[in-house]
Image: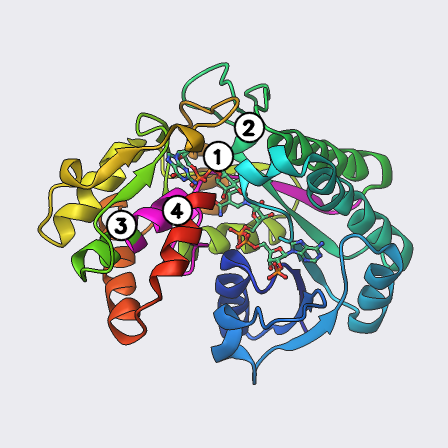
Amino acid sequence: MDQIAFITGITGQDGSYLAEFLLDKGYRVVGMTRRSSTDSMERIEHLQTRIELLQGDLLDQASLVAAIQAVKPTEIYNLAAMSFVPTSWNQPVLTAEFTGLGVTRMLEAVRQVDPAIKFYQASSSEMFGKVREVPQNELTPFHPRSPYGVAKAYGHFLTVNYRESYGLFAVSGILFNHESPRRGLEFVTRKVTDGVARISLGLTNVLRMGNLDARRDWGFAGDYVRAMWAMLQQPVACDYVVATGIDHSVRDVCQIAFERVGLDYEKYVVLDEHLLRPAEVDHLLGDPTKARQELGWQPTVSFEDLICMMVDADMERLRNHPVRHADVAFASAHS
Ligand code: NAP
Ligand code: G4F
């Protein structure tokens, strides 16, 4: 049977890498996009002749049912969400609607249209929040610290519940932070690599940052989409932690990124208290043993290489298209 993948969130970082990966595997790839007055296709521009796009919104049940009926996918990857943690304090209800209830709408649509469709839910290490143990694995209890983390925990448990209640092949991938040159500009790694490139090119001379001591387990997004696919190829549906098993601080990100262009981060990075979070997740470190043993999954890009890859890409981008100073001011004031 032909393999047909339906991806929500295809215009996002992970959606673009997953689409590339599945196309290379011979899948027919259909992505869901929401209506927008501006173009959000930048990350999938290069795939436009190879993928199909269809409009739908996680807030609209009928649009999801209609999309799944039209596409008849064999696999669904539910990557769409409001994914930026700070925004979830400013828009907690919308976050619950997109990131939490959106999962219910997707699972209901699958159950209604074709319960044989395999379903991947993009869960998050943010669910561990105020961590109960280090490192975190599939059995570590959750203690989310943001409305985003709470919404993701809801989506995770609902995925498990639909598997147990209705026998759906539904899996929850508990992915730790993963980055790339396609990462949104407001997330910390990309904010730093973009800021470093601007400073190096003389477009600005300061980088305002929040908590430099927070620690994360950062990997390369291109590696993590392989794990998503592998989860849906298993004989039995279950949940997996995907991580590198190595943690670093935000300060490490700054140090490596500035060193890449021959600068000392301490001369440019300034603490901005507005960027501290109401409740912080201090330390995430994943234990990917189960993914390694059962999926045969391993990361291929080191933390240092990842940060250097992102700095190089931002240098290249800004050399070709320097952005106006007004944009810089907007970005640093809001993330
Ligand atoms: P991202 O770049 O922010 O992409 C999010 C995608 O969701 C975009 O395509 C966005 O579309 C879409 N979307 C948002 N609200 C929607 C709605 N109401 N209806 C339809 N589409 C909607 O996120 P990402 O980094 O690729 O992450 C993918 C998923 O993995 C997310 O669910 C995220 O929470 C989760 N996750 C990410 C990480 C990570 O480190 N990257 C780790 C764990 C879990 P527009 O282009 O229209 O905005
Ligand atoms: O890059 P971040 O914004 O990512 P965060 O909050 O860990 O969330 C990301 O990873 C989750 C997986 O664990 C995903 F589910 C989620 O969708 C998203 O992709 O922040 C990382 C750390 C935080 O501790 C934050 O306080 O960096 C710290 N930080 C310090 N200064 C900053 C800044 N974060 C941002 N965004 N901007 C700063 O200036």
Q: Amino acid at mark 3?
A: Ile
Look at the numbered disc 4 and give the secondary structure of its residue. helix
Pointers 1 and 4 in contact (C-beta within 8 Å):
no
Which numbered disc covers residue 307? Answer: 3
Contact flag, marks 2 and 1 (Cβ < 8 Å): yes
The answer to which of marks 2 and 1 sits earlier in the sequence is 2
Q: Is any atom of residue 4 visible in this view?
A: no
Q: Report crowding for label 1: few under 14, some 14 to 19, many 20 or more residues within 10 A (C-alpha).
A: some
- Quadrant of res 158: top right
Residue name at image x 76 percent, y 47 percent: 102
In front: label 1 or label 3:
3
Name the spot of residue 42 as percent of width and height, x first: 50, 71
Q: State which tag comes first along the sequence, 2 or 4.
A: 2
Q: Earlier in the sequence, mark 1 or mark 3?
A: 1
Q: Which mark is residue 332?
A: 4
Three-letter amino acid code of the residue under disc 2: Glu
The residues tagged by marks 2 and 1 sit, at their Cα atoms, a distance apart of 8 Å
- In which quadrant is the N terminus drawn? bottom right
Cα separation, mark 1 vs mark 3, equals 26 Å
Q: Earlier in the sequence, mark 2 or mark 3?
A: 2
Quickly name the residue at label 1: 290
Residue labelled with disc 2: 138
The amino acid type, in three-letter code, at marker 4 is Ser
Please provide percent x and percent y for residue 249. Answer: 29, 31
Discs 1, 3 touching: Cβ within 8 Å? no
Q: Which residues are magenta?
A: 168-194
